Amino acid sequence: MPTIPSLLASVLLYLAMSSAWAIDRPFAVITAPGATEHHLTRETISLIFKRKQKYWDNGTRIQPVNLPTSNPLRRAFSQTILGHPPEALEDYWREMYFHGVLPPYVLASEEAVILFVNSTPGAIGYVSACIPEQGVEVVLTVGELPTCPK
């Protein structure tokens, strides 16, 4: 039977490895066409996805969109931008719910995120795949994204 120190060491090793893996996973944060902000900081994006910044400078309501909690890109985004894995934010969202604040929408795939962002004024999301040349604005990249085929 494993001892408590060995279990603790295993958990710490897992957290360190998953955190390092998340940093190595590249992604781009994308916004809807015509967004007034063309470059965003990680801090601003964190405020948006925690629903602490709700409007763009032009007054349009921000519509953030996430991938499912089980998606590796969601984990990379959460750890890199929000500073915590998705499950660590569950208490935060329970508290926010009691203040009338709902978490970002969740869509099943990166393709769905691109379609949502492309067709929804004020939308913001993240993807790891190539970014379509038309339709969305890239406002932040983390790591090097793969080259898109022409």
Image: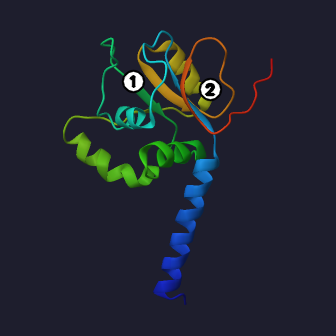
Q: Nearer the viewer, residue 73 or 36?
A: 36
- Asked if the residue at tag 1 contacts the one at tag 2, i.e. Cβ–Cβ closer than 8 Å, the answer is no
Tell me if 148 is positioned left or right of 72 in this view: right
Instruction: Please state the horizontal and vertical placement of residue 23, each as a whole percent of the image.
Output: 58, 49
Q: Is residue 50 above or below residue 32?
A: below
Residue at point 48% right, 85% down? 5
- The answer to whether residue 5 is visible is yes
* Residue at the far right in the pictured view: 150
Q: Which quadrant of the figure has residue 145?
A: top right
Residue at point 30% right, 25% down? 54
Dot in front, 2 or 1:
1
| Residue ID for mark 1 | 63
- The answer to whether residue 69 is visible is no
Tell me if 51 is positioned left or right of 80 in this view: left
Residue type at mark 1 is Gln
Residue at point 49% right, 16% down? 32
Residue at point 56% right, 67% down? 14
| Residue ID for mark 2 | 111
Q: Earlier in the sequence, mark 2 or mark 1?
A: 1
Q: Which quadrant of the figure has residue 21?
A: bottom right
Instruction: Tell me the quarter of the image containing the N terminus.
Output: bottom right
* Residue at the far left in the pictured view: 99
Instruction: Please state the horizontal and vertical placement of residue 55, each as a whole percent of the image.
Output: 31, 21
Residue type at mark 2 is Glu
Instruction: Tell me the quarter of the image containing the C terminus.
Output: top right
Tell me if 98 is positioned left or right of 105 in this view: left
Q: Which mark is residue 146?
A: none
The residue carrying pointer 1 sits among few (fewer than 14), some (14 to 19) or many (20 or more) residues within 10 Å by Cα, namely many
